Image (cartoon, grey):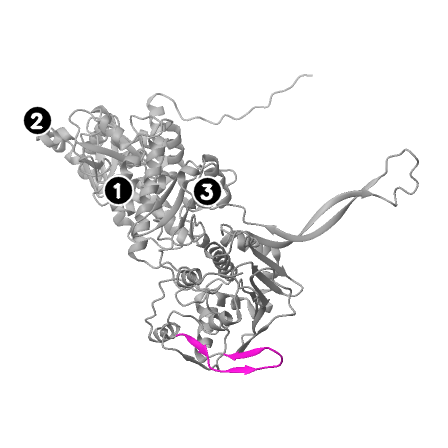
Amino acid sequence: MKFSSAALSIFVTAIGVSAFSTSQFSSRSAFVTQNKHQHFKANDNGALFMSAVVETEKQAETFEFQAEVGRVMDIIINSLYSNRDVFLRELVSNAADACDKKRFLSITSQVGTDAPSISKPEIRIRGDPEQKTVTIEDSGVGMTKDELMSNLGRIAQSGTKKFLEALGEGSADVNLIGQFGVGFYSGYLVADKVTVITKSMVENSPQWKWESSAGSSYTIQEDTESEPIEGSGTRIILHLKEDAQVYSDPYKLRSLLEHYSEFIEFPIKIWRENTEYKKIPDDEANKDLKEGEEPKMKTVPETTEAYELMNSQKPIWLRPPKEVTEEEYKDFYKAAFRASYDEPAKWTHFVLEGQVECKSILYIPGMLPFELSRDMFDENSHNVRLYVKRVFINDKFDDLLPRWLKFVKGVVDSNDLPLNVGREILQKTKVLNVINKRLVRKSLDMISEVMNDEDSSKYIQFWNNFGKYLKVGVIEEERYKGDLLPMLRFFSSKSDEEYTSLDQYVERMAEGQKKIYYVAAEGLKNAQMSPIIEKLNKKGYEVLFMTEPLDEICAQNIKEFQDFEVVDAAKEGLQLDEDLEGDEESKKKREALNAQFKSLVEYLQVELADKVKSVVVSDLLSESPAVILQGEYGMSPTMQRYMKTQSVASGNTLGGINSMNQAIMEINPTHPIVEQLDAMVKTNKESVETKEFATLLFDVASMTSGYEVEDPGNFAKRVMSLMTLKAEKNGVKEAEVVEKKEVEVLE
């Protein structure tokens, strides 16, 4: 087979001559072993070459390494990769590159149509527990002896010596993956000896063998003893370390391939043992078989070994969106994210072009993933998978999406992301910021489409599953607050048990209303019973109910919506819009009430000094005798309980809890209970009955305002005392125990 010089020139320039040449995302050029006593010299370009070649028996040649090689190997094994499972990812990526180069050469060569057909490149993986080896073989471009000497005789062609010097100075720039040619070395994470057998596409090329036991040298010789490679390709045999025998297990290899390489373009086949059960005649049971009787059968296992294709799933994100069907999107979601029982609620497929190139598919799950139901920010839940040229890199890059979009699943494939040499750490750069913004924007667009769907139940289901994440977004992400606020949903005093949006609230605002009001409570029923909303309801003002601790924090961060201030109705000094007009008559009325109940206010402030910060007369209550509010910087009872619970769960002592509780008691001067207590204070404020009555008023106000009664036992005694007093006034005497007389039973 002959190739044009022009084609080879293009190939060498654009891709590189070796099956393991450096590419944009991985090293394919360097093979190295560890040794601390090695001898090399660098050429003018900084590449490392062998300094000595020693002839050994037969045709084998031994090449000694230079000193820098040992240091590079030490970095690879001990520092570069945090997980040695990635060795298979790196070597399969190398094999895929070799196959890609073979395809390229086949297309650009001057071989005529009458030439023998070139078989389709493929990759084969085989684990052998008995031999303690793993074999990765490709039918790619292969290498000649000269290419072996050139590509395996130096660590990398892109400044390795300078890299080592920079490492020593602590200033190494390792932003680009594959920059220093270390992909092949990952094999030494699991192997103490590596054998490389290769045969080039060049016509009449012999088969060559490269081998190293991680010592001070390696050998190259013509290979006549190993199994011949058909056509061209490279076979890497890893002789596993004692603590890495698990990698010879076909099931372990398959799981790694499914994790890292299931979307590689070329077929990946894995050697595995299959057992099938067949029915055959049972000779023993059929000894006495009579003529005409049906022979008895038995089931026996039949074991076969063969290569099995494992990467049948196609990377649909690389196809134009118009060519992908709805069924393909759903099937990909279920397969890629192991979500067999979930239908995605929405998805988006897009390509980012220009300064940064990126292809991606994002999904909104149909139901809350199990791991997020336990912990909404579960560290083990990684839903965005990063690929580079179909090779899975990682799913632990938190910077691709903010945590308030933790529920979004998807894939991102980009060659522009700056990864470290080991391809395990994502560097923070402008490229990452561009991709992050686009992913967030596409996610918000998906949510908006669900929200605007004609079937409103779809968004209700989404909100029930993932609404809390949008609330976190409002709290943590100021730049997206304008997009998120219309997506929020709350219960309200006018929506019964259905959700309402802020836009709907504004549309229903009463004439003259200038603020948006909300109250925090533990649950919808408690919010509806809150005495705080009495006067607001009377004025026709709608009140939003914040029924979870996260709701309250979210509301505090909203501050304003469509030029309307968002106000907590449970805070001290609430003034309705007409109060701000400065009505002189209302002002005089409040002053008269304060003077009338001055003695009661002073009495309550003394008696409840350890419970409230102050007591004031209110004109906001219409049905309840009293209410407990919070000062400007105080926490609602719901938030106080939440903070205490979190403190106990974390094993910490929550300091400053008293500063969080700035309780203020407001009394309703028109309520009969308050009028009665006022009369009791004026006639006999030192009596036990007056004190019990005042404390009971506070307890009732606390309960209806969402607080817990500190001493339920004393509270019960006070209630029973009042009930007894009421009964006595109604002429019911205390029950007497009457002696039970025996009744004679007549037979």
* Amino acid type indicated by mark 3: Pro
The quadrant holding residue 466 is top left
Residue in view at x 93 percent, y 36 percent: 290
| Magenta residue span | 47-64
Q: Which residue is nearer to you in this view: 17 or 47?
A: 17
Indicate which disc, 3 or 1, sits on the residue closer to the N terminus.
3
Read off the residue under disc 3.
Answer: 369
Q: CA distance from mark 3 to mark 2?
A: 59 Å
Nearest to the observer: residue 644 or residue 392: 392
Look at label 2 and name its amino acid: Glu
Looking at the image, is 16 positioned above or below residue 579?
below
Name the disc covering residue 585, or none: 2
Q: Where residue 256 sits: x, y (%)?
A: 53, 55
Q: Secondary structure at mark 3?
A: loop
Residue at the disc numbered 1: 481
Q: Amino acid at mark 1?
A: Lys
Percent position of residue 615, x then y = 20, 38
